[in-house]
Image (cartoon, helix red, strand yellow):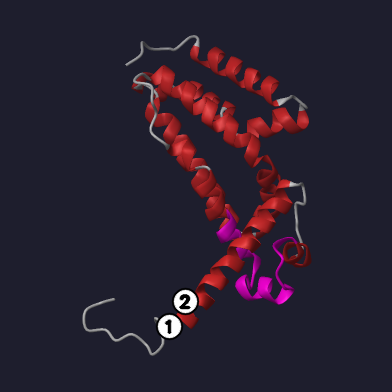
Amino acid sequence: MFAGSVAPPGADSPQLDGRTRRAATSRGRIVKAMLALVGEGVISPTAEQIAARAGVGLRTVFHHFRDMDALYIELTAEVARRFEAMAAPFKSPDWQGQLAELIDRRLTAYEKLLPLKRAGDVHRHRSKVLQASHAASQAALRARLQSLLPAARAADAAAFEALDLTLSLDSWQRLRDHQRLSPDAARATITHLVALILAAPKEPDA
């Protein structure tokens, strides 16, 4: 509260606090329900399906999320919370070890993200929220990769672009969905490609 401000009557009442908690609980259940449905392969869950899974009334779903973009905002925030480990500090002191950590983190997260990626691909063209979230995540992943590479390798444009592509969720999705590789086989393929890209740098490491 700002100094000199006056709280509205009943602002701190137990009744209002209870309503706030119940609303937050319902909202959380709705988000988790949609995440669960998408994770099971339901790319476009209906409000009825979400309400049934969340154990709330249909009116509650519409009350909390008056349009799909509002739900997408909540979903992208929940996904970000689930994968904060990807941005944790690296343990290795050298860039090669840090790159190995980055690869392991990404591929582990990508496998869990695949159902959401499939749903996002279907709906992104209709949602500016999803478009902005996708662009931001791509930029963050690219910057993270670039920041750990030695200057000479980051400056090798062709090699860096090849590395950025290889370590993308799109590449993982292709290997898993289109080339029908198992997670272990897809991981081995990406590790092999990274080794090939890094095998012959044009300049000495910084």
**Residue 18 image point, x, y percent:** 51, 76
Mark 1 surroundings within 10 Å by alpha-carbon count, few (fewer than 14), some (14 through 19), many (20 or more)? few
Q: Which residues are magenta?
A: 53-75
Task: Indicate the amino acid at tag 2.
Answer: Asp
Instruction: Please give left or right for residue 74 compared with residue 87 in the image.
Output: right
Identify the secondary structure beneath mark 1.
loop
The answer to whether residue 202 shows anywhere in this view is: yes
Q: Is residue 126 above or below residue 112?
A: below
Which residue is at a point 72% across and 66% down the rendered structure image? 55
**Residue 44 image point, x, y percent:** 75, 56
Marks counted in the figure total 2
97 in magenta = no
Name the dominant secondary structure of the magenta segment. Answer: helix
Residue nearer the viewer, 85 or 129: 85
Instruction: Please give left or right for residue 11 compared with residue 78 in the image.
Output: left
Q: Quadrant of residue 117?
A: top right
Which residue is at a point 48% across and 21% down the rendered structure image? 100
On residue 17, which mark appears? 2
Task: Quickly name the residue at label 1.
Answer: 13
**Residue 34 image point, x, y percent:** 68, 57
Identify the secondary structure beneath mark 2.
helix
Inter-mark Cα distance, 1 to 2: 6 Å
- Residue at the limit of the structure toward the bottom, as seen here: 9
**Residue 67 image point, x, y percent:** 64, 70
73 in magenta = yes
Q: Are marks 1 and 2 in contact (CB under 8 Å)?
A: yes
Task: Indicate the amino acid at tag 1.
Answer: Ser
